[in-house]
Image (spheres, rainbow, N blue to C red):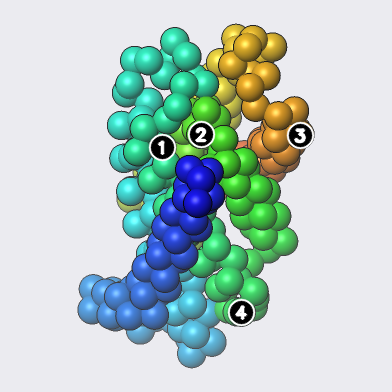
Amino acid sequence: MNSTSTGTVLYVTSIICVSLFYEILRIKVAPALFNSYTRIYYERLSSAKKLTWGMRCISKFASISNSIIVVSLTVISLNNPGVWGNPFQAHPWSVQASVSITAGYFVADMAWMLRYPVEAGAHYSYKFHHLFSLLGFYTVLSYPMLGHLVSIRLMSELSQPYAHFRDFYKEINIKLPPLYVLNSICFTMTFTFTRIFSQLLFYTKLWEVFGDNEFYRVPMHIHVMWLSAGAFLDILNMYWYTLVVRGMWKILMEYHNKTS
């Protein structure tokens, strides 16, 4: 077995293991923690909302844990000075780990959305987001030289915990206390820097290496695949960003009117 085949088997195995890990979080760990530490708020929900939130909470718990792990690994990857001088160099273990972990989470999350489409509240935009992300991850794992550029994109996971805390506040009908408002502001700010401004950095670094010898070491159809996936995700993020800003503005106005 050659090195490419060995690497492919290793990546697939790691993704499967990560997917199983998040399934265990969903089925065993998350429900126990949710019932133990939020029982008072949980009792406020109707029976129908308890069922729906039970499904969503498990997914959100897994997403938050994934965000913490992946962002930590991404910071380690981008802290390497050589990345900024030559983003097409072979990536270290931290890039491979962050991409594999995120891909494994997306596989598990996609399976969850397909199995429980109503309870999970999975909109088609989330499914398309996961599919195009997995396409990008496939090309990155196949051609390690692309890993450093994708590390910039993976910083977007930093906004996920604030999004899930916002949804939890909504479900328990706590919409205007200062903590809820602060969470909304943090969500908007992290979304702005990690999903909007960071993409300017991404395309700037891509333009710097576009057309050089390192760039052409990767087959052109691979470039088309991962750049198309990235472009779709950027368009989707811009659409989500308009909703995020409008939502924050609405919350700020409601809080101002209530406290004035």
The answer to whether mark 4 and mark 1 are in CB contact below 8 A is no
First of labels 3, 4 by sequence position? 4
First of labels 1, 3 by sequence position? 1
Q: Which residue is mark 4?
A: 115
Kind of residue sitting beneath label 4: Arg
Residue under the image location 50 percent in, 51 percent down: 1
Determine which of the numbered discs, if any, sits on residue 95 in the image.
1
State which quarter of the image contains the C terminus.
top left
Mark 3: which secondary structure?
helix
Q: Which residue is mark 2?
A: 144
3D distance between C-alphas at marks 3 and 2: 15 Å
Q: Position of residue 44 (x, y in %)?
A: 39, 81
First of labels 4, 1 by sequence position? 1
Residue 55 seen in render: yes
Residue under the image location 34 percent in, 15 percent down: 81
Residue 259 seen in render: no
The answer to whether mark 1 and mark 2 are in CB contact below 8 A is yes
Determine which of the numbered discs, if any, sits on residue 221 in the image.
3
Q: Quadrant of residue 121?
A: bottom right
Kind of residue sitting beneath label 1: Val
Q: Is residue 122 left or right of residue 109?
A: right
Bin the neighbour count of mark 3 within 10 Å (Cα to Cα): few under 14, some 14-19, many 20 and up.
few
| Foreground of the two, 63 or 205 | 205
